[in-house]
């Protein structure tokens, strides 16, 4: 859906003030954005608040927002920034003085994947896959999630995670290699 002509048309109409187009964007992307936000923060109320703020800000600033052919990417990036900003603000109130990137844990439980695996394979394989995924670093889990679950390309992931293109390639390549190695090393 990220590059579909429907999303692009809705985006253009929303920018002109079309409320139905705006509602269409919310309907199409809300669930996907929420799932991504829930992996960035365990505070689900904060994620919901950030999503509401994001959509309110979009509506208020619609005339100043640029055209895009990558609506989903734009929204994911905006949500990520909003969650990081909110986390930083909340931490100031709690009087925490640490690096925000180190506090921000990417929660990579991949529940949708577990559901698919449980329906197609036995419970043993599902548990084993969860164990192997948990061994990845938080940045590897986030890159894998964005690549395979949000269907983003390496350039979009690079922009979203604020790392260079080659680092994304390395993260994904290393993660896949580590997953394969761990999976086959423990194969019964």
Image (spheres, rainbow, N blue to C red):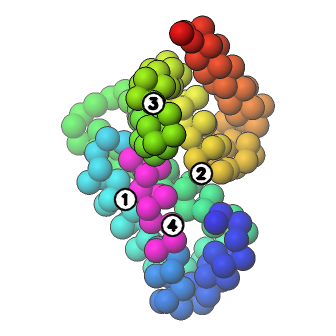
User: Could you classify mark 1 by the number of other residues whose Cα lies within 10 Å: few (under 14), some (14-19), or many (20 or more)?
Assistant: many
In the rendering, at what x and y percent does residue 67 appear? 70, 74
Disc 4 marks which residue? 29
Disc 2 marks which residue? 150
Type of secondary structure dominating the magenta stretch: helix
Task: Identify the image quadrant of residue 39.
Answer: top left
Whole-Å distance between the Cαs marked 1 and 4?
Answer: 14 Å
Residue 6 in view:
yes
Is 72 contained in the magenta span? no
In the rendering, at what x and y percent does residue 59 appear? 47, 79
Whole-Å distance between the Cαs marked 3 and 4?
Answer: 32 Å
Residues in magenta, as a range? 27-40
Residue at disc 3, secondary structure: loop
User: Closer to us: mark 1 or mark 3?
Assistant: 3
Which residue occupies 58% across, 17% down? 183
Disc 3 marks which residue? 122
In the image, 168 versus 89, the foreground residue is 168
In the rendering, at what x and y percent does residue 10 appear? 61, 82
Give whichever of discs 1 and 3 has the lower sequence position.
1
Disc 1 marks which residue? 50
User: Closer to us: mark 2 or mark 3?
Assistant: 3
Which residue occupies 63% across, 43% down? 148
Residue at disc 2, secondary structure: loop
Image vertical order of residue 67 relative to residue 121, above or below? below
Q: Residue furthest right?
A: 166
Q: Is residue 160 left or right of residue 55?
A: right
In the image, 105 versus 93, the foreground residue is 105
In the rendering, at what x and y percent does residue 23 appear? 46, 82
User: Could you classify mark 3 by the number of other residues whose Cα lies within 10 Å: few (under 14), some (14-19), or many (20 or more)?
Assistant: few
Image vertical order of residue 5 relative to residue 29, above or below? below
Whole-Å distance between the Cαs marked 1 and 2?
Answer: 19 Å
């Amino acid at each position: 859906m990220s590059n579909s002509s429907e999303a692009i048309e809705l985006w253009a109409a929303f920018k002109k003030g079309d409320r139905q187009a705006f509602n269409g964007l919310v309907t199409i992307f809300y669930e996907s954005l929420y799932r991504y936000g829930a992996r960035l923060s365990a505070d689900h109320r904060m994620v919901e608040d950030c999503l509401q703020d994001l959509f309110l800000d979009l509506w208020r600033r619609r005339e100043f927002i640029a055209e895009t052919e990558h609506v989903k990417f734009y929204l994911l990036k905006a949500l990520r920034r909003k969650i990081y900003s909110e986390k930083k603000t909340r931490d100031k109130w709690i009087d925490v003085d640490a690096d925000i990137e180190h506090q921000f844990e990417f929660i990579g439980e991949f529940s949708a994947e577990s559901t698919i695996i449980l329906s197609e394979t036995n419970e043993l394989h599902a548990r084993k896959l969860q164990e192997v995924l948990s061994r990845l670093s938080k940045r590897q889990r986030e890159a894998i999630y964005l690549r395979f679950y949000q269907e983003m390309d390496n350039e979009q992931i690079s922009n979203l995670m604020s790392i260079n293109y080659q680092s994304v390639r390395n993260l994904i390549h290393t993660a896949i290699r580590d997953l394969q190695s761990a999976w086959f090393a423990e194969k019964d």
